[in-house]
Image (cartoon, rainbow, N blue to C red):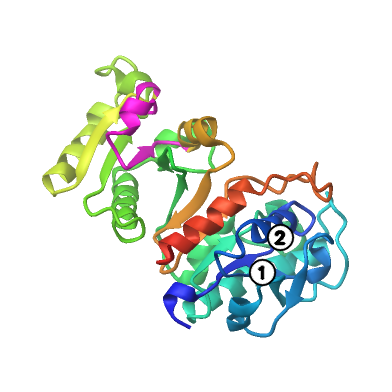
Amino acid sequence: MTKGVLPVVISCGEPAGIGPEVAARAWAAIGADIPMVWLGDPRHLPRDIPHRVINTSSEALTCNDSLPVLAHDFGSDVVHGTAQPDHAQGVIDMIAHGVMMVRDGRASALCTAPIHKKALKDGAAFLYPGHTEYLAALAGVDDVVMMLASDQLRVVPATIHIALQDVPQKLTPAGLRRTIEITHVGLRDQFDITAPRIAVAGLNPHAGEGGAMGQEELDWIAPLVTQMQNEGYDLTGPLPADTMFHAAARARYDAAIAMYHDQALIPIKTLDFDKGVNVTLGLPFIRTSPDHGTAFDIAGKGIANPTSMIEAIKLAHHMAGGS
């Protein structure tokens, strides 16, 4: 198989959530245009979407009338809305299998359905805070960043799943530099932006307002931005976060670096809640994911919106060289 026609591999995520449903409905919507293969237990798929168990990913290219499935026996049916500890290891194995397929040249990119972190910890002693850290460990890399991307905005949080009170200590010049570097390379190599423009948010309100609302901007964020500008990076900032996400401001950059989780996620979820995609930059392979959780409350009811999964598959295919 050539890169242009390799399927996108989709890991099942938490079977008791909406992952299997949105993957199946994404195939129904775009499977005729983008080859894909689903990893998981066929018993966990919705009954109204046809599937076909295949033996190799190449079979997915000729499987036009059904969702192609590389089957893994999880041992039992799913109870929607309730994570089952005996499924945890299977969920983890499907992520690892997907990574192996991409790295072995059997798939073009990995799209991961949402996981339930507590379920994985309780059922399989999962050691990682989430998908991103586990994927980095599988790839043998130390530094990765999470990008949330849509047609309206790309944003990268420099710190992610930590308490707000811990952000000033966790945020360092070296860490912010590495986040900017990885984002620059990702925009250039995976989004085909020859000269990426990156906006850097301030940490404090009004970007510190000259020290009146915080010193971090004066002490090291602005000097770091200036230093990297002198090294050839096209950076602006630190900018007040409350004025950098309106339409005119967004037109001036290709991605924004935010200082903490909600500073990044609130604007993209406000602008494009259904179409946001989680992209991991810094990995030696392409990984996307829908920007939502397991949604236990609506799992199995046939009402889950597949839009974010559709966008995640489309973006993975595009980043891998597909049209």
What amino acid type should be assigned to the residue bearing mark 2? Answer: Ala
Q: Percent position (x, y) of residue 221?
A: 26, 35
- Residue 132 appears in the rendering: no
> Which mark is first along the chain, 2 or 1?
2
Q: In the rendered view, would you say 41 is above or below 281?
A: below
| Badge 2: residue crowd in 10 Å (few <14, some 14–19, many ≥20) | many
Which image quadrant for residue 10? bottom right
What amino acid type should be assigned to the residue bearing mark 1? Answer: Trp
Q: In the rendered view, would you say 151 is above or below 140?
A: above
Q: In the rendered view, would you say 251 is above or below 229?
A: above
Residue 80 located left or right of residue 271? right
| Badge 1: residue crowd in 10 Å (few <14, some 14–19, many ≥20) | many
Residue 311 located left or right of residue 240? right
Residue at (34% x, 56% y) in the render:
186
Count the numbered circles shown. Answer: 2
Asked if disc 1 and disc 2 are in contact, CB closer than 8 Å, the reply is yes
Q: Which residue is mark 2?
A: 24
Q: Is residue 280 magenta?
A: no
Q: In the rendered view, would you say 223 is above or below 50?
A: above
Image depth: mark 1 or mark 2 in front: 2
Nearer-the-camera pick, 277 or 221: 277
Q: Which mark is residue 38?
A: 1
Q: Which mark is residue 214?
A: none
Residue 63 located left or right of residue 6? right
Residue at (35% x, 39% y) in the render:
256
Span shown in magenta: 242-260
Q: Helix or strand or loop: what does disc 2 sit on?
A: helix
